[in-house]
Amino acid sequence: MGNDRSLVLLQGLIGGLLAGVALSVSGPWWMVSALALLWAASRSSFASAIWGGVAILVSHRWLLALHPLMWIGVPARLSLPTAIAIWLACALLAALLLASWSYLVQRLPLRGSLPHALLVACVWGLAEVLLSQSPLFWIGVGGSVLPADPPLAALSRWIGEGGLAALQLLFGWWVWRLLTVSRRESGWLGLLAGGLTGVVLLHGLGAWLLANHGPVQQRSDQVTNTVALWQPAIPTREKFSAQRQRDLPGRLKSVLQEAESADADWLMAPEGTLPLKDVLIEPSPLPLLSGGFRWSRGRQHSSMLLVEAGAITTANPIDKHRLVPLGEWVPSWPGLSGLSAVGGLEAGDPSRFWRWGGPPAAVAICYEISNGVALSRAVADGAQWILAAANLDPYPLLLQQQYLALAQLRSTETARPLLSTANTGPTAMIRPDGRIAARLPPFDSGLLIVPFSPSKSSTGYVRWGEAPLFVMIGASALVLFKSASRSGLRQVRPRRRKTLPLDQE
């Protein structure tokens, strides 16, 4: 008994480590192995909690880069403990979520059957979709597909990120069942053949989608723009210093002139580039789409701001809706300003659809890139491209890689090109099939000039959203409980003997 308990805890620990690696470097071989161990550990809620907590501790270790926090007023002795506390809090939340999922796995009947696995896998996928709309920055199983497995990621055009998570859970269940079912049992070969066939067919379907629905073919009526993407590489801890604030207007003027010389149609600048005094030192030679801050009705917003050609002031903003708890949003308590140099912010409208004078855009500011639901709704409303603006300094390259993978997934889901501009990176153009067309080196300042064609095509995910997940949950639940009911009837109704026992004749 003790050895069995130790084994299941070890399965949770090793599986969590593998999941953390998969969320850090991508690769189906890491995640599927991690999920197979999760299925083995799912008979224990505590072991499942270990899996979730360890996975986040490994994959979200970039949170420790918040330290030092003295530049925003946190005392030196509290800086590292604060960063560690935030990191551990995220891991604890993941542990609670995995424990809850494990409880569901244990409570449902016919554990180990395909309907059972399908139901709990789709519940997991739907939970990831809901988490992506919450204040938590969540990089889930669905987001781990890219950049390692583009064919599987292509299926997100029909089933979204939640569907990808469910598929990977099913892959993990298949591996777990292969290892737990005896090869001498009659169903083992069928399980092996069926799983391999499914993996090959799904990847073949995804490859076909990439080959036939990749970069949109240029039509005679389709407009091609030239866009300049600026990566200023200004250290966040120095951004609000007097010297940096004096230098910024001159740097922005030079970049605008360089973009004009390159015949760019507009210039994009990252989240938070323009300060509250959003006035240029001279009229902009071309439209400027820049992140910045603004006041409205006594409340401060983080926004994407438009400076029209020939203007010096901003207009027509779209405000960031999803704010970082404590970092940007704080309760209205006296003396509490949060972990931000600009204090507490007000959330904007939930819609990410922006009409700014050029091709309508779906806007993701910072970690709004993880909310595929909001961006797909903006595309359904008429957005022809995705605008992603962020400031990921002082975080390390790991977060940039995770952010870029999510950006690729958003392009793939919606068949929209994505332009990403970030303070230290990633600054890149992503094609509608999720492939990176051009990118600036991380952490270096520079200007990326890219040709860009908006898209008006549509995908199943944009039209249906999470409907396939709900259908699969309903269908698998129906099959599961019907099968359980029939199994129960057979157990409570033993077959009657046709002849009396010998002692009763």
Image: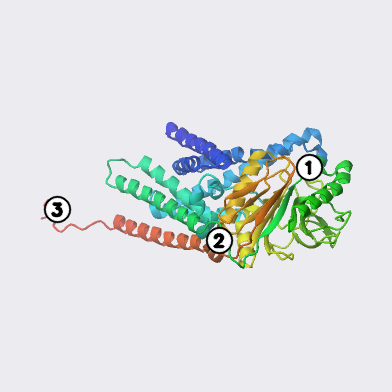
Q: Which quadrant: the N terminus?
A: top left
Residue 54: tell me if it is visible: yes
The residue that label 1 is drawn on is 234
Q: For marks 3 and 1, give the one nearer the viewer.
A: 1
Instruction: Tell me the crowding category of disc 1: few under 14, some 14 to 19, or many 20 or more residues within 10 angstroms, Cα based.
Output: some
Report the colour scheme: rainbow
What is the C-alpha distance between the residues marked 3 and 1? 91 Å
Q: Which quadrant: the C terminus?
A: bottom left
Per the image, label 2 sits on a secondary structure element best described as loop
> Disc 2 residue type?
Gln
The residue that label 2 is drawn on is 217
Instruction: Tell me the crowding category of disc 2: few under 14, some 14 to 19, or many 20 or more residues within 10 angstroms, Cα based.
Output: few
Q: Earlier in the sequence, mark 2 or mark 3?
A: 2
Per the image, label 3 sits on a secondary structure element best described as loop
What is the C-alpha distance between the residues marked 2 and 3? 80 Å
Image-based side of 408 in relation to 243, left or right: left
Image-based side of 126 in relation to 387, left or right: left
> Disc 3 residue type?
Pro
Q: From the viewer's side, name the closer residue of 329 and 234.
A: 234
Q: Earlier in the sequence, mark 1 or mark 2?
A: 2
Instruction: Tell me the crowding category of disc 3: few under 14, some 14 to 19, or many 20 or more residues within 10 angstroms, Cα based.
Output: few
Q: Residue at x 13, y 57 (%)?
A: 499
Where is residue 38 shown, x and y percent of the image? 48, 42
> Disc 1 residue type?
Ile
Which image quarter: residue 457? bottom right
Where is residue 384 shown, x and y percent of the image? 64, 63
Where is residue 5 shown, x and y percent of the image? 46, 35
The residue that label 3 is drawn on is 501
